[in-house]
Amino acid sequence: MARSPTPEERYARIVDVLAGVTQGPAVSESKKRGFGSSGQLQAGGKIFAMLARGNLVVKLPRQRVDELVEAGAGERFDPRRDGRLMKEWLVVEPGSQEEWLPLATEAMRFVSSNR
């Protein structure tokens, strides 16, 4: 039986496939961690995806996040874990049926179009 890729391996594939993105420093390399994540992906200086607590977190239009949450594909991001949800950020767990790369690509396009 083939081993499932780890969240870190899945995230690394996103980094490899998406052209023109920059990756922020790992948590150990920077005090500024951006929502407690590491290696945030940026397009035009704007964060659009990150790996946080083993989950993919992407920035999408609020309506799209609402659709995905309603479909059970993910949940709204609560970086402080205090109930203050970020309405344009979606958390996708490793076990989700939702593919990470298409969501990251969609997020990259979204932040790139909001310059």
Image (cartoon, rainbow, N blue to C red):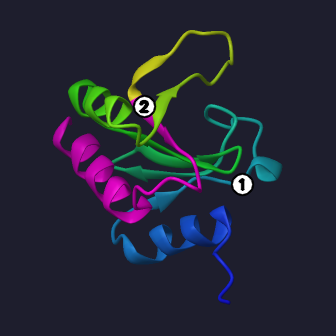
Residue beneath label 1, please? 26
- Residue 101 inside the magenta-drawn segment: yes
- Residue 61 inside the magenta-drawn segment: no
Residue beneath label 2, please? 89
Quadrant that contains the N terminus: bottom right
Q: Quick one: which residue is furthest to the bottom in this view?
A: 1
x then y, percent, for residue 94: 59, 56
Q: CA distance from mark 2 to mark 1?
A: 20 Å
Quadrant that contains the C terminus: top left
x then y, percent, for residue 108: 31, 52
Does residue 67 lie above or below 25 as drawn?
A: above
Q: Is residue 101 left or right of residue 52?
A: left
Q: Quick one: which residue is furthest to the front in this view?
A: 1
Q: Quick one: which residue is furthest to the right in this view?
A: 28
Regarding mark 2 in the picture, which secondary structure is present there?
Answer: strand
Q: Which residues are magenta?
A: 89-115
Regarding mark 1 in the picture, which secondary structure is present there?
Answer: loop
Q: Is residue 73 left or right of residue 52?
A: left
At 72% from the left edge and 54% from the top edge, which residue is drawn?
26
At 43% from the left edge and 43% from the top edge, which residue is drawn?
58
At 44% from the left edge and 57% from the top edge, which residue is drawn?
97
Q: CB of mark 2 within 8 Å of CB of mark 1?
A: no
Mark 2 residue crowding within 10 angstroms, few (<14) / some (14–19) / many (20+): many
Residue type at tag 1: Ala
Residue type at tag 2: Trp
- Which of the marked residues, 2 or 1, is nearer the chain's N terminus? 1
Q: Nearer the viewer, residue 115 or 109?
A: 109
At 64% from the left edge and 76% from the top edge, which residue is drawn?
4
Give the mark toward the camera: 2 or 1: 2
x then y, percent, for residue 34: 61, 35
x then y, percent, for residue 70: 33, 29
